[in-house]
Amino acid sequence: MSAVTGSPVLSPPRPISTARRDTPAQLRRWVVVSVLTAAVLLLAACLVMARVQQQARIIGDQAAPQAANAADLYFALSDLDAQVARLVLTSGRDELAGSRVDALGTYRERGRQVDESLQRSLTTVTGDGERAIVLELLHGLGSYRERVWQALTAGPSAAGYYTQATNVLHLDLLPAATRLREASEKRLDDAYGSQRATEIAGVTIAVLLGGALLILLIGLQVFLARRFRRLLNPALITATALTVLLLVPMAAVLILQGQVLSRARDESLIPFLDLTRARAISYDASADTSRYLISNRLDLYRQDFDRKAGGLEAGDSGLPAVAGGRDVGPDSTEQVVRRWQAYRAGHERIVKLADAGRKAEAITALTGIRRGDASFDFAYFDAAVAGITASRRDDFEVAVRDARVLLTGWPFVPAVVLGLVILLVPLSVRRRFAEYR
């Protein structure tokens, strides 16, 4: 007490520590940086997932169907000419009327397929170069059909007109169809490349931005524990858990859908395209047998057949390779090869008959539709090939649907989850700010 008044002496107020004065500003910085990081992650994740979903749609609805359509076009053109050759050979022979009716029906069916393929190409191509190829094909097809009509109505002069028609096919139509096929396959490769790049970007975003957000949320939790003696903050724990529950599935979905699409391309689509190409070559080779007879044994066509047949029986593009694989049983592959060899044996028999001056017998052996005739053997071979191509096309379509299912809703999931995180971060420090008012 004071000697004068006897009242107690009051000590001066304790100064607020510098750390305590800086706490609101530090806390505000933690919150702002965390919220901004979450907002950037939200925007980036939504854009990436939407982009991946769009690219999967492009692959499944545009790039892959265009590649398959171009392959089907090449095959249909090859068979179209093979059927014209059968029609020329059976013209005026009543005993081959059944074969002629079969060839005419197939010719009309292939013509319809060619028209539909060109129409689809004209409406789906994106580049001026591809459109120019389609227009070139349309023009060449008109010229080809004109010569086919002349060949089928020319009587004894049919061989000359047919030669003109098949020259148009091999010099104009098939090279143009090959360029269209290559352009469509390049677009498919580009689509897969873009999809892969987006996938990598998405995983990178999940690791870097997501990791940064997790570090900030954990750091804010530690900061609150040290300054305010609050070991656990329920809002921050919830925000951290939501972030983890978003990032792990998001990265998993990106990787998994990429694997599904890549596997579908490597195991279904590319084998389908390779086998369709071999199938088209086989049709063109079978037409060489007819052309040999129509041209009165022009050796060029025998050489062409031998070259094509040799390619079909060996090498990476041969039937044992393109009709085989993990998706095909060894019995099915062997069946394709064996049936092709049966047709080739029939071809050799027909050539020998023609070389021996027995052309009428050779034509009957080629165009007949009974078991043992070349046309029957080829149809039997083609049925085995068609079964594998249809299975591969179906497998690819199923895989694309699976990838789409994986991506369903993902353009919106990051917005919902990270939106909650952005709300929870300020909520977690609201009471701490209240202590400084």
Image (tube, rainbow, N blue to C red):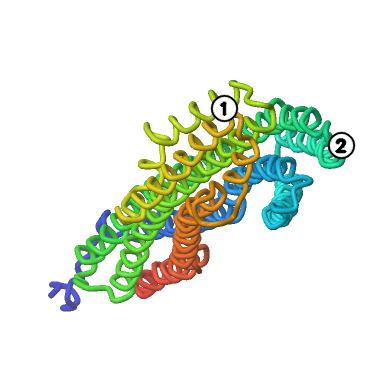
Asked if the residue at tag 2 contacts the one at tag 1, i.e. Cβ–Cβ closer than 8 Å, the answer is no
Of pointers 1 and 2, the one earlier in the residue sequence: 2
User: In this view of the protein, which residue sits in the foreground, 419 or 338?
Assistant: 338
Helix, strand or loop under label 2: loop
| Figure check: 66 above or below 43 | above
Count neighbours of disc 2 (C-alpha within 10 A) and say few if under 14, some if 14 to 19, many if 20 or more. some
x and y percentages locating residue 277 in the rendered image: 53, 40
- Residue under the point 69% across and 32% down: 294
| Figure check: 233 above or below 337 | below
x and y percentages locating residue 158 in the rendered image: 80, 34
Query: What residue sits right under mark 2 in the picture?
Result: 154
Query: What residue sits right under mark 1 in the picture?
Result: 355
Count neighbours of disc 1 (C-alpha within 10 A) and say few if under 14, some if 14 to 19, many if 20 or more. some
Residue 75 visible in this rendered orientation of the protein: yes
- Residue under the point 66% across and 29% down: 175
What quarter of the picture does the C terminus occupy?
bottom left
Residue 205 visible in this rendered orientation of the protein: no
x and y percentages locating residue 119 in the rendered image: 76, 49
Q: Answer with the quarter of the image where residue 221 lies.
A: bottom left
| Three-letter amino acid code of the residue under disc 2 | Ala
Q: Answer with the quarter of the image where residue 281 lies.
A: top right
User: In this view of the protein, which residue sits in the foreground, 249 or 298?
Assistant: 298
Q: Answer with the quarter of the image where residue 361 lies.
A: top right
| Three-letter amino acid code of the residue under disc 1 | Asp
What quarter of the picture does the N terminus occupy?
bottom left
Please state which of the two labelled residues, at mark 1 or mark 2, is closer to the viewer: 1
Is 107 on the left or on the right of 21, as rendered?
A: right
- Residue under the point 44% across and 44% down: 340
- Residue under the point 63% across and 22% down: 298
Q: CA distance from mark 1 to mark 2?
A: 25 Å
